[in-house]
Image: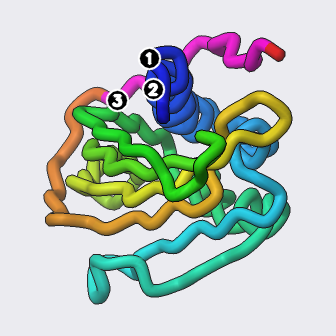
Amino acid sequence: MLTTTDRAEIAELCQRYAVLVDARELAAVGALFADDAELVLPEPPDRLTGVRSVRGRAAIEQTLQAVLGLAATAHAVLAGAVQDGPSEVGDTASGLVTGQAHHLAADLDGYTNTVWFLRYHDDYRRVDGHWRFSRRQLDISWIERRPVLTPRVAAAPVSTAQPS
C-alpha cells in the first residue's frame, strides 16, 4: 500500500519531469525513468493519443531532444491521482496526471505558443529506493495556438539537481 510519503515522492517525480524538460536537462529527465522504461507519444496534430513508443533511457532522452528546436517550453502539472499497483510489496503504482505544455516557436510574425492540454497515463516503479517512471503515455485532449507578443526566451538558470 502506498504511504503518504510514496504519494508525495511520486507527485515530486511528475513535477520534476516538467521542470527538467523546460530546463532542457534531458539527461536528468532520462534519470527519472527506470532503465527499461517506455515512453509513448502522440503524433500531433494528426494523432493525439500515444502511438509511438520508445524504450530505455537513451531512447527517451534522444526523443525528448525535440524540445531543443523550440524557443522555450513551459509545462504545468494541473492535477494528479495515484493508485497502488499490483505488487504486494508496494514497489509499483499507476497514475493519471493532467497538465498543459506550452511550446514557444519562432515564426514569421514573431512567436507562437502551441498549447497542449494533456494527460499522462503513468506506471511507476521504485528503483533503488526512488520512484521512477516505468511507463509514461502522453495523450493530448486538444491543442490551441496563440500569438505571443513579447517573449522572454532566455530564462535564468534554475538549479534542478535531484537529491540522492
Please name the amino acid that badge 3 sits on: Pro
Which residue matches tag 3? 151
- Identify the residue under disc 2: 7
**What is the number of callouts on the image?**
3
Which residue sits at x=27%, y=56%?
A: 118
Q: Which residue occupies the foreground of this view, 88 or 22?
A: 88
Q: What stretch is highlighted in magenta?
A: 151-163
- Report how far apart the C-alphas of labels 2 and 1 lie in the structure: 5 Å
Q: In this view, does 112 lie to the left or right of 143?
A: right
Q: Position of residue 139 (x, y in %)?
A: 32, 68
Residue displayed at 21% across by 53% down: 117
In the rendered image, the vertical position of residue 162 relative to residue 90, given as above or below:
above
In the image, residue 3 above or below residue 156: below
Find disc 1 in the rendering and name its residue.
4
The relative height of residue 86 versus residue 21 in the rendered view (above or below) is: below
User: Please, what is the dominant secondary structure of the magenta stretch?
Assistant: loop
Q: Work out whether mark 3 precedes mark 2 in sequence or the reverse, and give the earlier one.
A: 2
Looking at the image, which residue is at 51% across and 31% down? 10
Label 1: how many Cα within 10 Å (few below 14, some 14–19, many 20+): few
